[in-house]
Amino acid sequence: MKHDFRTIEKKWQDRWDAEKAFAAVDGSDKEKFYALVEFPYPSGAGMHVGHIKAYSGLEVVSRKRRMQGYNVLFPIGFDAFGLPTENYAIKTGMHPRTVTDKNIEKFSSQLRRVGFSFDWDRVIDTTEEDYYKWTQWIFLKLFEKGLAFRDKTLVNYCPHCKVVLSNEDSQGGKCDICHSDVVQKSKDVWYLRITEYADKLLEGLEEVDYLPTVKQQQVNWIGKSTGAFVNFEVPGTDEKLRIYTTRPDTLFGVTFMVMAPEHPMLDKYADRIANMQEVLDYRTVCAKKTEFERTQLVKEKTGVKLDGLTAKNPLTGKEIPIFISDYVMMGYGTGAIMAVPAHDQRDWEFAKKFGVDIIEVIKGGNIEEEAYAGDGEMVNSGFLNGYTNKKDSIARAIEELTKLGCGEMGVQYKMKDWAFNRQRYWGEPIPIVHCPHCGMVGVPYEELPLRLPKVENFEPGSDGESPLAKIESFVNCKCPVCGKDAKRETDTMPQWAGSSWYFLRYIDPHNTECLADPDKLKYWMAVDWYNGGMEHVTRHMIYSRFWYRFLYDLGVVPVAEPYKKRTAQGLILGPDGEKMSKSKGNVVDPNVVVDEFGADVLRVYILFMGDYEKAAPWNESSMRGCKRFLDRIAGLTDMASGKGETPAITKSIHKTLKKVTEDIENMKFNTAIAAMMTLINDIYDCGKLTNDELGVVARMLCPFAPHISEEIWEMLGHKDLCSLAQWPEYDETKTVDNTVEVAVQINGKLRATVELPLNCDKDVAIATAKADERVAPLIEGKTIVKEISVPNRIVNIVVR
RNA sequence: GCGGGCGUGGCGGAAUUGGCAGACGCGCCAGACUUAGGAUCUGGUGUUUUACACGUGCAGGUUCAAGUCCUGUCGCCCGCACCA
């Protein structure tokens, strides 16, 4: 048969659709397998091959598991709220709803053309009312529990997009959406108290099977550190200067204090600070610096010494100066530090520049040259003198501070609370009413969804106000508690809201009573295997684990962690080896590939091009090799006949089957395909195979290239779908050879190979090796020092 | 600076975890069939001085045996970054 992909791919896609071949079954007593891929953001550009790679991995695993008898849930949906759509809508004058619908249609048709085995009855769209009703429901629950709150603080603000950004969305001081510089702005914003869950998120990592680097990134992001809070008296005031330190045992080495330029104590005691103008000037300079400038490592320490405020070391009673400097951040710890210049490089540099004393309290370094951060014996430290173990000295210091009432043990996290509102139109409205009498009141549950009003103009206001603020019919409402006039919250939720729980909705996508039926949740959760990009490891994954854990604490979901296993695919690079991007013009459109080579070739090539978890450049001529491979598979149909097994082929099939079965589970798709290529080469060399053997080939190929497999399966006379046929089992005994080729080394150098029976006796192996015509002359007349035999592998004879 | 990963032919990449380096594919060379080939088929293809040779970034070490383990070093990629 000819590999006529243009005809057969459409034919089988239609049949899968018509038979709902890949529908997950509720209430089944089969073992379940929930495979999750990150749902796409449906942009106007359509999909690119990177999307296809991201889904192909679990597509293969899902198809195989289905054939192995699992009840598989492999869903897809669209994460469709967000700025790119809104910006596109503003530019073109189309409504975001229309844009979104168009894009989803485009994405869906592309996905179908590739032949993915998604359950199309469970597709979700985060912008649909039935969906975001439950996003709002979860928000209200968070609000009820005090985990959603408003606060006026310094926030990351993107002047270009006119939105407040979370820390996660402004990494490196650049807006994640438009890449312009983010500025710090004081604003009244919504927060989700994710820090309350920091420990649970950290502990949860112990029970899950994530890639080590994924875990590591999450641990770093949460950034837990333990240490102590210490309160320094500020003579002449009632207030204490509170600092956080991980090394309270170095307190005897403190020679000055540093506050962040924005520290509130400065304003409070402005009248006591003689050089307040200098302080204010410095603050202005710092505020103007971009994040980039502030993080330049090489730059010199700057700062201002406060004239009029000092601090008193609680252990020594010594009075020490207070400085302000921008190397101390308001956003971490208490916004102030105790400086130990002998043992902290930043403090050391600062002390050198401003001429402050440097007192050694840990022996072992040369503090004239640089700060010493290593371990050593404590000196100049009163009751801590003589300690050599860091852990002990820290514990003792905390004990002493606690006794004196001027400090206590403390924990800090790098992770900040999640800034949760956006002043934009295309997002979930935050279901809160501001009542002049009752304060902030949640919209009653029975009124959900709080619908996004249809508007003509969804451009944000120049003052950074949400477009919704201009719609009086939306803003003005009655307070649900007292019934008097009130105003609605007009901000919307960030892009990350809808994706924080989508995997739960797949389980019961049409439920109108709750976000998903508890029995169904109990059956399907947790997600068995989640695959996606490395870029979502610290944002989406942490947010969604937080929401999920919150729902668990509410009793809504059955297990504590949502994802049992997490893997990540590597990027597909452009043919030039660079990251694919529109500006470089090296983006490959999957539609073009499907048109020219077919979906099966695209799928096989993407999985064959390299290690699934690593980046690999696109190479079209390499793809031709995959086309050749599938063409040759199609050609097998002309070779197959009713009977006449060849032992060598039988063995080759079982070996390949074993390899493919195992490799799929380990995401070693490239070697699985390589093994099948070898098998096909073997069959071509042999020139024949039986129909049954061809059936096995079709089934093991099916997860990778399902269309051609179905076609072959049908040609063999099967009425059922190959995609749902039984996965062929390999027979271990048929995968091993009776004889093996064993390498013979002399002094570690390969000199010959000998054919030996499998698991043959060590002595026989060595004897056979020595008798070999190429080996014998080389050991003749030499002293044999040692003989090593590794069964079925190697014989090494050491001679002198 | 800290954390993680990587370095193997002309290219993408394999290597049962210490046991025949280079599977599989691309490319290339030669041949066959062809009016033709960006089609198909067959054979070859790590390097070189063709042999007791050399070869997994480089230099050492451990071992009968090292791409794999250890020490040092160079280079690349990714993440975090004045986190107290």
Image: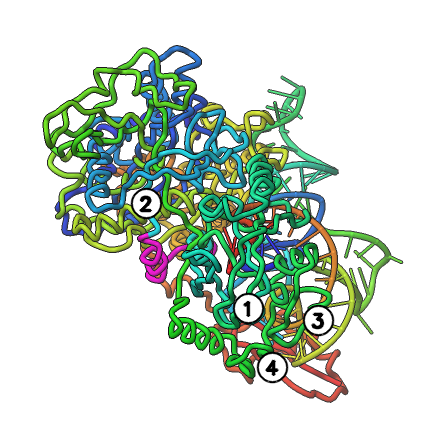
Using the rendered view, name the quadrant where residue A409 is placed: bottom left
Question: Image height check: is A14 above or below A793?
Answer: above
Q: Mark 1 or 4 closer to N-term?
A: 1
Mark nearest the camera among 3 and 4 is 3
Chain letter of the residue beneath label 3 in the structure image = A
Mark 2: amino acid: Ser
Q: Nearer the viewer, mark 1 or mark 4?
A: 1
Q: Where is mark 4, residue-wise?
A: A788
Q: CA distance from mark 1 to mark 3?
A: 25 Å
Residue A714: which disc? none
Note whether residue A27 is visible. Answer: yes
> Position of A71 compared to A243: left or right?
left
Label disc, if present, on residue A544 of the rendered structure: 2
Q: Are marks 2 and 1 in contact (CB under 8 Å)?
A: no
Which is more N-terminal, label 2 or label 4? 2
**Please, what is the three-letter code of the amino acid marked with disc 4?**
Ile
